[in-house]
Image (cartoon, rainbow, N blue to C red):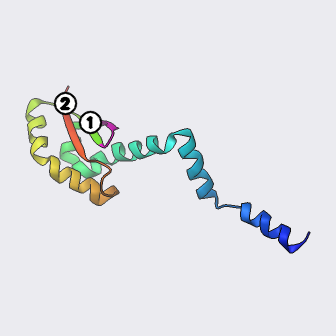
Amino acid sequence: MSPGNRRRESDRLRPAGEVLAGLLDRLGYREHLREREILEAWPRVAGEALAERSRALRLRRGVLFVRVASAAWCQELQFLKAAIIDRYAEDLGPGRVRDIRFTQH
C-alpha cells in the first residue's frame, strides 16, 4: 500500500467520542441525555430539604417543570427560583435552565 493510500484511510478515522456524539445527534438522543442530566441534578442543585418536597419532571426549551408538595412550597420556591437557576448554571453550565415553573400536586 502506498503512503498516499494510508493517509486517506487514516483521514477517515475519527475518535469514538466524536462518532458517538454524531450518532446521538442524528438519533435525537443528545437532547434526551441533557434533559436527564438536569432532572437528576435537581436534588443536588435544589438541596436536600427542597428535594424532599419537590421533584423535577421535565425540561422543555430551557424551562424546567417541577412538582412541589404544597402551595406553600410552591411559593417558597418561587422566591428561590433565581438562585436555583444560578446554581444550575454553576453546576451544568449557563443557559441550560432558563426558567422554572412550579406546580402543586
Residue 1 lies, in percent from the top left, at 92, 69
Mark toward the start of the polypeptide (1 vs 2): 1
Q: Residue placed farthest to the right in the image?
A: 1
- Residue stretch rendered in magenta on the structure: 57-62
Q: Is residue 35 left or right of residue 88?
A: right
33 relative position to 57: left or right: right
Point 9% across, 45% down: residue: 79
Q: Residue at x 51, y 39 (%)?
A: 28
Q: Amino acid at mark 1?
A: Phe
Tag 2 residue: 103
Residue 88, position as x, y percentages in the image: 27, 53
The residue depicted at 32 percent of the width and 50 percent of the height is 96
Mark 1 lies on residue: 65
SS class of the residue under badge 2?
strand
Residue at disc 1, secondary structure: strand
At label 1, counting other C-alpha atoms closer than 10 Å, the crowd grade (few under 14, some 14-19, many 20 or more) is some
